[in-house]
Each structure stands twice: as C-alpha cells, then as structure tokens.
Amino acid sequence: MSISSQINEKRRKKLLEFQQKYNLNFSNINLLNQAFMHTSYINENNLETKDSYERLEFLGDAVLKLSISNLFYNNFKDYQEGDLTKLRAEIVSDKNISNYAKKLGFEDLIMLGKNEKKMGGLKKESILACSFEALLGAIFLEYKEKGYKKASDFLIKNFKNEIISINEKIDTLNPKAILQEYTQGISKELPTYNLVKEEGEEHKKTFFVEAIYKGNIIGKGSAKSIKEASQNAAKDALINLGIIK
C-alpha cells in the first residue's frame, strides 16, 4: 500500500485547512501527511517503516534546537552558555513541545493504529512532541533552500511569547548558579549570601537573606528555609541586574 493512498478527500480537506490556518503551502501533500503518521499506523496499514514521521522528526529536532538557540542567543545576551543550555532544554522537552502541538490541533491530525489510539496515544506527550518536530522537518524539506527560515519562522511566529517567557521560570533553573556564572564573567569575585534575620516560632520560622556582591546588596529574599531564601535573593539580584524580568 502506498503512502498517497492514505489521503482521502476528508483527510485532504483537513490538511488543507491546517495549511491555510498557519500560512503553509505544501506542493507535496504526502510530505505534510507523513508528519502526522505514527509507526503504529504504519504497521497496521502495511506501509514501509520509512513512511512514518520518524525520519522527519530527526530533521525537525535539529531545526527546533537551532531555532531556539538562535532566539535565546539574541534575546538573552548576558546569559552564559550553561544557562542558555538549561533554558533550551526546558523548551525542547516533550512536555513543553507537546503543548505546542495541542495548540495547533495535532490531536485531530495524528494518525495512530487502533490499539495505540485506544491506549490514549493522542494524549501522550512523546507522540505529540515527535509529530511537532516532524512537521518542522517536513517544512524544512518542502521549502528547500528557504526551508530552515520557513520552519523557524513558523515556530517563532506561533510560539515566540511562550519561548521567551521561559525566562520567567528562572527560579526552577537555579538562580544562584546563574548569578554565580554571571558575576564570574565580570570578575573573579563571587556573590555571597548573608542571613539577616529570622522571624517566627521555632518550627515556623521565616529566614531573610541578602545577596552581596563586591560589598553591595544586590538582592533580597525570604522563605521558610535558608536555602530557598538564598535562591530568592539570587533571583531578586538577577531581576535588579536586568538579566531577567
């Protein structure tokens, strides 16, 4: 059975509507369709393994990471390599990319085998994320010499705000480590953390910490533990230094 035989009129209409909605124009509709074909569907319909989205996913993964790297490099100019890597890792995770796929309506486009579908495959983060990457790979191939730009533009146009806002989740990415790397880029002197005071009953204390750099208070934080208060002070320092918003 050929891959082209999988596109009936109903399917063709669905793919055309998707293209129109997101400013895509595939001359090869089979290539677009392939981006949504899971291996379970391939196996149940006696298609060749190469017809699943896996090869496209391989390409799309590279396009995704390069696009994100370029965006972060130009928007987070004070971040060191390690910090940029942490941010990118968060963005390209299955959990995150699957949310992008859901917003584009992939649950209505991905083709699964009957058993995989019964097992809730359309809700699986890995399947949604892989199909999203496969779509980027398909765009890359369809638009040939303009492929990377088209795929990258598609990603940024639809999700730039979500991608950039990862910066606001800096507290989950170890603010103390980021502040340390930032200050090391300026001088050899590292920030220190000073416990200013404790308030409350013994088992319900709140700790207040200051982040100190070159003798100046650059951030303040409080929490129920000294460790968390120090992280909050580091985050406050990053905000005050203009590294994050």
Image (cartoon, grey):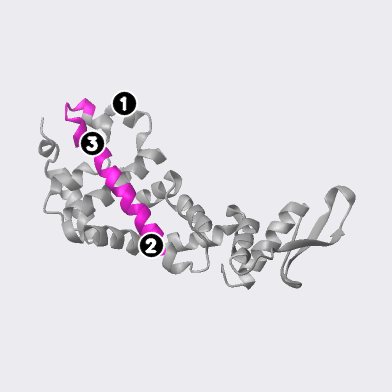
Q: Secondary structure at mark 3?
A: loop
Contact, mark 3 vs mark 2 (Cβ under 8 Å): no
Give the label, 3 or 2, closer to the camera: 2
Q: Position of residue 153 (x, y in %)?
A: 29, 63
Quadrant, the N terminus: top left
Quadrant, the C terminus: bottom right
- Label 2 belongs to which residue? 70
Mark closest to the chain's N terminus, 3 or 1 = 3
Give the label, 1 or 2, closer to the camera: 2
Q: Secondary structure at mark 2?
A: helix
Seen at 39% across and 39% down, the residue is 126
Which mark is on residue 115?
1
Marks 3/1: CA distance? Answer: 17 Å
- Label 3 belongs to which residue? 52
Q: Is residue 18 magenta?
A: no
What span is in magenta? 43-71
Marks 1/2: CA distance? Answer: 40 Å
Which of 99 and 219 lies nearest the eye of the viewer? 219
Marks 3/2: CA distance? Answer: 29 Å
Which of 181 and 162 lies nearest the eye of the viewer? 181
